[in-house]
Image: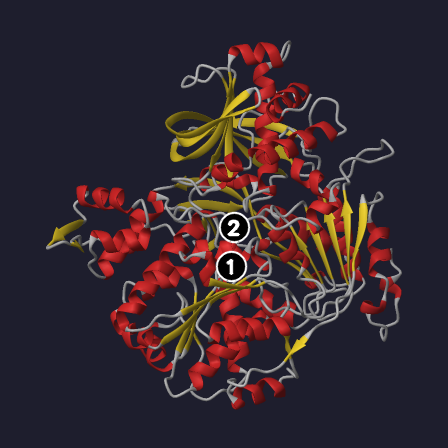
Amino acid sequence: MNNAAALPPDVSPRDTDLVTDTLAALSTEPVAVVALPERPGVTGEWPRWVDPALRAALTDQGVSGLWEHQVRAAEAAWRGRHTVIATGTASGKSLAYWLPALTAAMGGTRATTIYCTPTKALAQDQRARIDSLGLPGVNPACYDGDTDHSVRASLRRSSRFVLTNPDMLHRGILPRHAPWRAFLARLRFVVLDEGHMYRGIFGANVAAVMTRLRRLARAAGSDPVFVVCSATYGDPAESAARLLGVPPCDIEAVSEDTSTRGPRTVILHDPSQAPDGSDPVSAFAETAAALTAWTDAGVRSVGFMRSRAGVESLAATVQARVTDSRDAVTAYRGGLLPEERRDIERRLREGELRSVAATNALELGVDIAGLDAVAMCGWPGTRLSFLQQLGRAGRAGGHAVALLAAQADPLDRFYVRNPDRIFGNSLEACVLDRDNPFVLLGHIACALSEGPLTTVEVRAAFGRSADAVLAALERQGLIRDRGGRWFWVSDTRADELVDLRGASAPVSIVDAGTGRVIGTVDGSSAPAHLHPGAVYTHLGATYLVDSLDLEAAVALARPADPGYTTTAHSTSRLRILGDDEQRPLGAATLHVGRVEVTGQVTGFLRRDARSGRVLGSEPLAMPPSHLRTTAVWWRMTADAVRRELPGTDLAGAAHAAEHAAIGVLPALATCDRWDIGGLSTECHADTGELTVFIYDGHPGGAGFARRGYDSAEQWLRDTCHVVETCGCAGGCPGCVQSPKCGNGNEPLDKSGAVRMLRSMIGAP
């Protein structure tokens, strides 16, 4: 595999056969090698209304012409149409909204734009690019939690292009809208970048924030045009309409990508099932091998993993294997301090780093051009994420290679063995529930604290849950009806009632010896990852957690190298609160409704860090958690069980079907298996029958279970296919075992699960 590494220094690694070298680094033959051909571009004419100074500045930076889709999107936004731009990574979406927004800013009305992105890094990147154009009067400025308080007032007055994030809009701008009134009065455009990230609970929250923003802008005298951008958007008009709360017919959808694109080769690999019967190789090992080979060859690359701990381990493994400089590789993930993230982004952009092991934190559109290769350790969760990660390579127009190494997981194997479902199908719909009362409770409170509203106005803005939410807020003494309008009457800050990203407050991890904060973990995940005795890794350093105080949101840890990893296990109970809909599904009955799940971390396993062998277990007494959410479930009567599942281990069959269904649902909805949970039982207390539940892991529900109910036939057909075609004898992580099972994957009956699933989809 050292062919590329042995090249003379004057030969670019781009000229080597990346595909051949990547295949040579793998231990076994891949399942498929898919060639995505080069695509020629289609150009369009510059709109006549573009400011001459803007066109000249872009020309000076090498923009000699426009792609046809850029012109279509820019013209639609300029005409006042809400627009969604759903074209590929590096297709020039930024230019499509720059043309109208910056032209308007430079005009006599001094029109303003709000650019909103999920991450501060992307906003900083956009600001730098706009600033480099040197346009008079625009003064692009980031306005986020890192912005110095001493300059915030001047930015409100002088900037005509403010770059922020949903969190800052919610907490820093909308609650303090009075000083922003002049800016809002001239607000012409609102740009929502990385639109596919606004899904589930986060999407429902952002949708409510946009409703509040539109209301305050109209009160100030403007009616802004919204532009939604995403390289990976399923059903763009419908998805954008759901996010903005407008009819799809009011959205101009631009989805045909007319930009040029270099050739790409995608290697689909399933190392966990060796075809010759030899011991399987892990996806981690193959990803590390590819990343090491690329780094030694001077190939600029990124290796994606799902977990923070996995990213740290991947970076450490590659660092230990590269032949020259360990400084050429590092880890990039959530939980790093802001200055650490920005330094890594700069070093990767400037070529100081050759390779980065990253979570999906680097999946977004930070402008890091020139990467040659991408390795994905496991399916990224959705086809949206897969295409985002694939798009990180080849951004400079050259040939690129991508490796998808399947983990022993149902969805991973499903996709690598069905390439047409990756490259041929439409993208998953961006699922969000605008009517989630748990979400709307806080946002209606915020809207009323920002200004009084009538009941009719609340209904018009926030939908069918408005009456119930108003009643709940009134019962709590937070609002009062005065003369037909609702007023906020509490001393509490309304924005504190909202958890924008669907996660509880982060828990800080503090070095017990120095008092230094070394990272953060979401509060809901803290009991499983920061319990006493847990092993935590940060930028290659290993810590042992001594204590966790959830009330104070602090975990104390000390540097240690115990030689093992830890995995928490838990128990859960579920009760049905309400049955919203039901319908027959083969031999079963399918339901969707409201449930309450009670969970508790009860202990953890210690595994050898090298072999994965279980070294022992420790009990824990963590406090229980309670989740009211939405679930989809199916039940089978005793007669149906006797007829369809004779001689079956019923508990094992239900448990196996539950695991497999959780693993495959992300093929239909924009979630991954960590966004959803499940419970199965031979006889549930509320149904008196064999029942399998799949529920959203967020208060009130995120829309994923509802998507499963609406698409149950396809969902369970695909689930049955995954289980049936897996080559294992009695069940494995590739079909019915789950990495997050609180019962240690016991009991499981693979063949019984197949019979159960077949009985529901009408297969003999």
Secondary structure state at the residue bearing disc 1: helix
User: Is disc 2 in contact with disc 1, using a CB cutoff of under 8 Å?
Assistant: yes
Q: Where residue 385 sits in the image (x, y, percent)?
A: 61, 52
At label 1, the amino acid type is Gly
Q: Is residue 647 left or right of residue 741?
A: right
Q: Which residue is mark 2?
A: 430
Foreground residue among 741 and 527:
741
Q: Which residue is mark 1?
A: 195
Label for residue 575?
A: none
Q: Is residue 83 left or right of residue 551?
A: right
Q: Where residue 683 sits in the image (x, y, percent)?
A: 48, 15
Residue located 32% across and 45% down the image: 464
Does any portion of residue 496 appear in the rendered image? no
Q: Does label 2 or label 1 sit earlier along the sequence?
A: 1
Foreground residue among 88 and 737:
88
Instruction: Work out which residue is located at the far left of the displayed protein and give it.
Output: 483
Compared with residue 158, is residue 671 higher up or lower down, i.e. above or below?
A: above
On the image, which quarter does residue 354 sit in?
bottom right
